[in-house]
Amino acid sequence: MKMGPAVRLGSIAASMDKDATEIQDFDTVVRVYRPRIFRFALASLRDRDAAESLTQDCFVKAYRARGRFRGDSSIQTWLMQIAVNLVRDVGRNRRFQFWKRAQTSAVDVGAASNWIPDQDISPEERVAAKEQVDKIWGVLTSLSERQRTVFLLHFMEEMDSVEIAAATGIARGAVKVHLFRAVNAIRKSLGRS
């Protein structure tokens, strides 16, 4: 069944009203969206303490700006935009750059292999999967900031190109190019080019 333009506009307007109402119940907003913001921050920074701080900063900024939320995007996209900007700020901070170079990874990459959904795999398959996760993390660190951000938002947060464009301020076409290049770099590192 195909919706006409008036029906689509009505559903968009209803969604925007719903988001504007939901933003007033900020405890619920934090409870619903905190895991996604934290997961993105952790994957971007690879430092649990920094990710916790960034997640908290994201919600503090959102709380202070909740009165200015116009509903032009979903709450998730709005929060992710704040988080993306905070990750960029951390990356630009020279002191963080020193510690980033001094400490290759604060996240136990072995723990990342537990993110692989099938827990009923053989020990050999688990080792092979861990090696692939290690390679992917290695490639992610070598990608440009934009490629890494787009990749993480797409594959970890399951955001589409329109949502990623809204969250990052990158044009939709450029989002697709960055995602394509990131995926190709990872495929090449895994020997799947």
Image (cartoon, grey):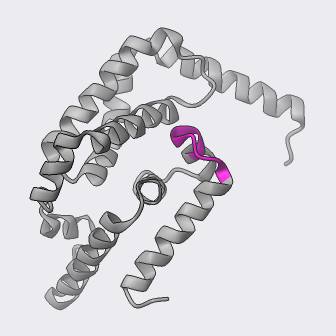
Against 55, is 25 above or below? above
Question: Along the horizontal axis of the image, is 122 left or right of 147?
Answer: left
Q: Residue at x 68, y 22 (%)?
A: 14
Q: Residue at x 22, y 73 (%)?
A: 119
Q: Residue at x 32, y 24 (%)?
A: 59
**Would you identify the image quadrant in which residue 155 lies?**
bottom left
Q: Is residue 52 magenta?
A: no
Rendered location of residue 158, percent (x, y): 48, 54
98 vs 38, nearest the viewer: 98
**Would you identify the image quadrant in which residue 191 lies?**
bottom left
Q: What are the residue bounds of the magenta stretch?
A: 165-172
Against 37, is 23 above or below? above
Question: Along the horizontal axis of the image, is 125 left or right of 26?
Answer: left
Question: Along the horizontal axis of the image, is 67 left or right of 129?
Answer: right
**Would you identify the image quadrant in which residue 86 lies?**
top left
Against 184, is 74 above or below? above
Q: Residue at x 43, y 84 (%)?
A: 188
Q: What is the magenta segment's predominant secondary structure?
A: helix
53 vs 99, nearest the viewer: 99
**Residue, far top:** 67
Rendered location of residue 26, percent (x, y): 37, 17
Rendered location of residue 180, percent (x, y): 56, 69
Number of marks present in the image shown: 0
Question: Along the horizontal axis of the image, is 108 left or right of 132?
Answer: left
Rendered location of residue 72, percent (x, y): 63, 25
